[in-house]
Image (cartoon, rainbow, N blue to C red):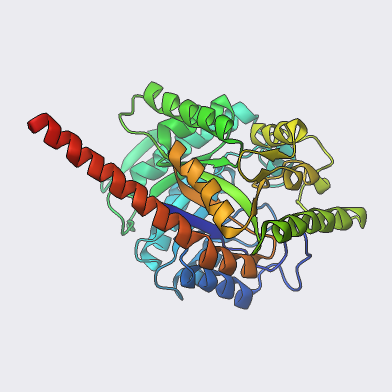
Amino acid sequence: MPVEFLGIAATNDGSETTPRSGASFDKEYTLRLARAHEDHGWDRVLFAYGSGSPDPAQAAAYVASRLDRLQILLAHRPNVSCPTFAAKTFATLDRISDGRLTVHFITGGNDHEQRREGDTLTKDERYARTREYIRIVKKIWTTREPFDHEGEYYRFHDFVSDVFPVQQPRPNVSFGGSSPAAYAAGGAEADIYCLWGEPLAKTAEQIEAVKAAAKAAGRTDVPRIQVAFRPIIAPTEELAWEKAHRTVDAIKARKARGESVTGRHNGRARPENTGSQRLIAIAEAGERHDRALWTPTAAVTGGAGNSNALVGTPETVAQALLDYYDLGVDIFSARGYDLLDDAIDFGRYVIPIVREEVAKRDAERAARGTRNLAAVNG
């Protein structure tokens, strides 16, 4: 199966290790970083969402109008707009990008962050709302006749859009989470299911949970699986591990100065969302797992988002990714701590190895299938 790579479309040069050098929306840097991904073999970039961050849809439109191939993953939280408005925004962006849009729906795992924008629903209520929201957006994308909707969270009458996506029947829907409620919602509605990087055995368990949820929802297909890591690569193993420890030291130094490195009180509070709780538990169980997974980057940030690292030479990190590919993962999200330079290095030195090895595996699989068919017919 084909393999894809997702990078980050940051709107400034800040990261956990380095404070940003300018405005929260640095137009020139945003385009430069996106172009680096397009020029170095990445498939798409994520425009993330935060309550006080630059609007990701407008940043995505800016990049899409200036680049030709790079695909867009737009993060969206249902609490910030009505689904009728959002569906039109997404369709318009798919038009601007000539059909390069995927939408990532975020239910929200932190009550404090949700309340910053007036969302006071409980976690279970948010998941129920997200499922209703996604279904409405899908219907708006694919329906040419006016319709009414009377749901638990949304009601409207006689609505029909006049802007439709380039992609037919619709753009893909992406979803993530590690709780039973997340598996149920994403298993039912997602084309792509996103996980944070965990040890292989735990990732395999999550993949099975997603498959089971899809089956329980009556689906005959299953979502594609995406897994996210923070790669730390260098020409030798020794240099890679030195770089890894410098990375954690830099995060600790920023926290010691009272600087926010996560947007969530420097990771001091115990996270509410299941995904972050899992990352912390994995870190507490040990620093190193499997071939190259390293947890101190997650531990020092309190399990904030995509934070487990893969450490080693490009060859080691590529082989680690292939271990996940063999589990059924075919989309890899990767983001370094020096956003621009790490995106270039990962694109130059890791992506080609993974693509070449995946092509070999697919060729071998096809050859086995041909031999088996010949044996049956013979």
Front residue of 355/271: it is 355
Looking at the picture, how far across and down is residue 242, in whole percent? 77, 58
Q: Residue at x 54, y 43 (%)?
A: 78
Q: Quadrant of residue 296?
A: top right
Q: Quadrant of residue 216?
A: top left
Residue 151 appears anywhere in the view: no
Is 313 displayed left or right of 350 in the figure?
right
Is 136 displayed left or right of 209 in the figure?
left
Looking at the picture, how far across and down is residue 168, in whole percent? 27, 52
Q: Quadrant of residue 10?
A: bottom right
Q: Residue at x 76, y 73 (%)?
A: 21
Is 26 displayed left or right of 168 in the figure?
right
Q: Quadrant of the C terminus?
A: top left
Looking at the picture, how far across and down is residue 14, in whole percent? 72, 65
Q: Residue at x 36, y 64 (%)?
A: 95
Looking at the picture, how far across and down is residue 330, in whole percent? 43, 46
Front residue of 137/69: it is 69
Outermost residue, left side: 378
- On screen, residue 263 above or below 208: below
